[in-house]
């Protein structure tokens, strides 16, 4: 896992000097260390520049901040200029630099994308810097502010621990001390978690804090040649799985809009859009795959990544996003063929989402599809199947199945789906009736036969589905 806290841990406990470089999509940061302490930081992020920090601290007025471009001279340090012009004091500059350095580092904690590179230099040339920030406090603040990320849980999977230095034991909460005690007692993480009062996400964050403060170390396991061979086989198996997933995604690209492709809501913030993009880029970037893959596979990987990139660039640009959103709105002005095509695209998108267990998103698309075209039985059938997966929507699911049956009474699938809904709710007689109707339409329907026979056929007479076929189940009722 590439994360700032792990680098800070190593730099602090090994008392290293040098610089740590971070490169993300549009973020560049340089952190300078001397003997395990942070002494300087540079950034290309506008909100982290010194002038902005001074403005937020109230040391520069709105007018002064707006005039900075006129005041600052190229190749001259902004702090020196502001002191010369008596806009700030030396003490205020010192505090602002401390604040800026902390912000530059702390803003790296939410990032699990991008690349870090540490360049160790014993003769660092940083002796002129008077500011020194201790890393343990930054590590604690950064992790406590951090939102849970699945990479934290994955990082600790199948790891063995040993107790480390208890220098920063005082920084732990009582719940975190209990986790550390569990590790000392030799209990498994599962046992420690079950005994903990923490929610799962807080548990993994706490374990990460304990580790990054040096209270526990991870034991390195020796790998034998046989284990390396097994590991190689696993990597080949994972590559095959990843490629199969890419092929499936490439085949369904036409049926996904940009929001579905990035797996974000239309209301997602720019930061959420960026996070989603980097998550997908880590998985689908062409550089992650072997160069000797067949050209047709490389083309599919490129198609997927190009689509993801295009989606991100469109949705991260306010003007392009607004224009794209208008295209997704219901085109009431379209003629019949275009309207039907639009509905069919939404139906295919919904089907893809349903297969991915993204039921709420599928439901939203199906509502639109059934509003555009009201006479498609298969639309209402999928609507019912989707609603049946959502808690509290069983009545609506039943209504959708009945609508599908009304539109396409010849389709046994709708009867089977409705029968399964009734069966799951304990309405056995209603369920049997639907399976009977399905079998009258398709005597070889596998699911209908199985369910009919499991429900006992005709009850006391113990008739099978074959007996049923000789009956007119839609005939007149006996007087």
Image (cartoon, grey):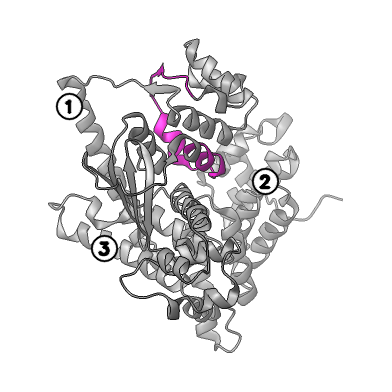
Tag 2 residue? 421
Residue identifier under label 1: 229
Q: What element carries label 1?
A: helix
Q: What element carries label 3?
A: helix
Q: Indicate which disc, 2 or 1, sits on the residue closer to the N terminus.
A: 1
Residue 164 in the magenta stretch? The answer is yes
**Residue at 52%, 47% in the rendered image:** 445
Residue ID at (39%, 47%): 130
Judge the density around disc 3: few (<14), some (14-19), many (≥20) Cα neighbours within 10 Å: some
In this rendering, the answer to whether 9 lies above or below 383 is: above
Residue at the (57%, 44%) spot, across then down: 448
- Rounded to the nearest whole Å, what is the CA distance between mark 3 and mark 1? 30 Å
Is 286 placed left or right of 178 in the picture? left
Magenta stretch contains residue 170: no
Identify which residue is drawn at 29% across, 56% down.
Answer: 285
Q: In this view, does 366 lie to the left or right of 288?
A: right
Viewer-proximal residue among 477 and 206: 206
Tell me residue 425's x, y (percent). 73, 40
Q: Position of residue 12 (x, y in %)?
A: 37, 33
Identify the image quadrant of the N terminus: top left
In the picture provided, is 286 more to the left or to the right than 95? left
Image: 186 above or below 223:
above
Question: What range of the chain is rendered magenta?
Answer: 139-167
Q: How far apart in space, not on screen, are marks 2 and 1 (Cα)?
A: 49 Å
How crowded pointer 1 is (Cα within 10 Å; few <14, some 14-19, many 20+) is rated as few
């Amino acid at each position: 896992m590439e994360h700032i806290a792990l680098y800070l841990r190593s730099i602090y406990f090994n008392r290293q000097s040098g610089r740590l470089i971070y490169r993300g999509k549009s973020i560049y940061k340089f952190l300078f260390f001397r003997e395990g302490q942070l002494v300087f930081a540079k950034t290309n992020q506008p909100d982290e520049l010194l002038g902005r920090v001074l403005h937020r601290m109230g040391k520069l007025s709105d007018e002064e901040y707006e005039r900075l471009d006129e005041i600052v001279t190229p190749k001259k340090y902004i702090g020196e200029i502001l002191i010369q012009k008596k806009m700030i004091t030396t003490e205020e500059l010192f505090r602002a630099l401390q604040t800026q350095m902390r912000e530059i580092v702390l803003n790296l904690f939410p990032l699990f994308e991008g690349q870090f590179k540490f360049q160790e230099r014993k003769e660092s040339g940083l002796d002129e810097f008077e500011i020194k920030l201790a890393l343990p406090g930054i590590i604690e603040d950064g992790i406590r502010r951090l939102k849970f990320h699945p990479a934290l849980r994955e990082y600790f999977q199948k790891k063995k621990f040993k107790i480390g230095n208890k220098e920063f034991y005082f920084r732990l909460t009582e719940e975190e001390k209990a986790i550390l005690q569990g590790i000392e007692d030799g209990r498994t993480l599962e046992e420690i978690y079950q005994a903990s009062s923490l929610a799962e996400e807080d548990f993994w964050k706490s374990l990460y804090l304990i580790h990054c403060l040096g209270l526990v170390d991870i034991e390195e396991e020796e790998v034998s040649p046989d284990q390396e061979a097994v590991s190689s086989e696993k990597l080949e198996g994972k590559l095959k799985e990843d490629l199969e997933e890419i092929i499936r995604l490439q085949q369904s690209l036409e049926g996904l809009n940009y929001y579905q492709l990035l797996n974000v809501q239309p209301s997602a913030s720019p930061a959420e859009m960026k996070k989603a993009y980097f998550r997908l880029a880590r998985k689908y970037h062409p550089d992650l795959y072997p160069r000797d893959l067949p050209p047709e596979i490389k083309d599919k990987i490129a198609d997927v990544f190009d689509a993801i990139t295009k989606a991100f660039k469109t949705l991260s640009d306010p003007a392009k996003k607004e224009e794209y959103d208008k295209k997704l709105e219901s085109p009431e002005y379209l003629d019949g063929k275009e309207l039907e095509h639009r509905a069919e695209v939404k139906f295919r998108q919904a089907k893809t989402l349903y297969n991915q267990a993204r039921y709420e998103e599928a439901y939203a698309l199906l509502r639109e599809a059934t509003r555009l075209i009201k006479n498609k039985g298969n639309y209402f059938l999928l609507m019912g199947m989707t609603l049946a997966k959502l808690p509290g929507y069983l009545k609506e699911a039943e209504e959708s199945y009945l609508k599908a049956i009304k539109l396409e009474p010849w389709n046994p699938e709708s009867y089977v789906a409705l029968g399964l809904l009734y069966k799951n709710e304990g309405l056995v007689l209603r369920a049997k009736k639907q399976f009977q109707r399905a079998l009258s339409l398709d005597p070889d329907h596998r699911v209908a036969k199985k369910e009919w026979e499991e429900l006992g056929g005709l009850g006391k007479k113990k008739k099978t589905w074959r007996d049923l076929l000789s009956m007119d189940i839609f005939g007149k009722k006996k007087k």
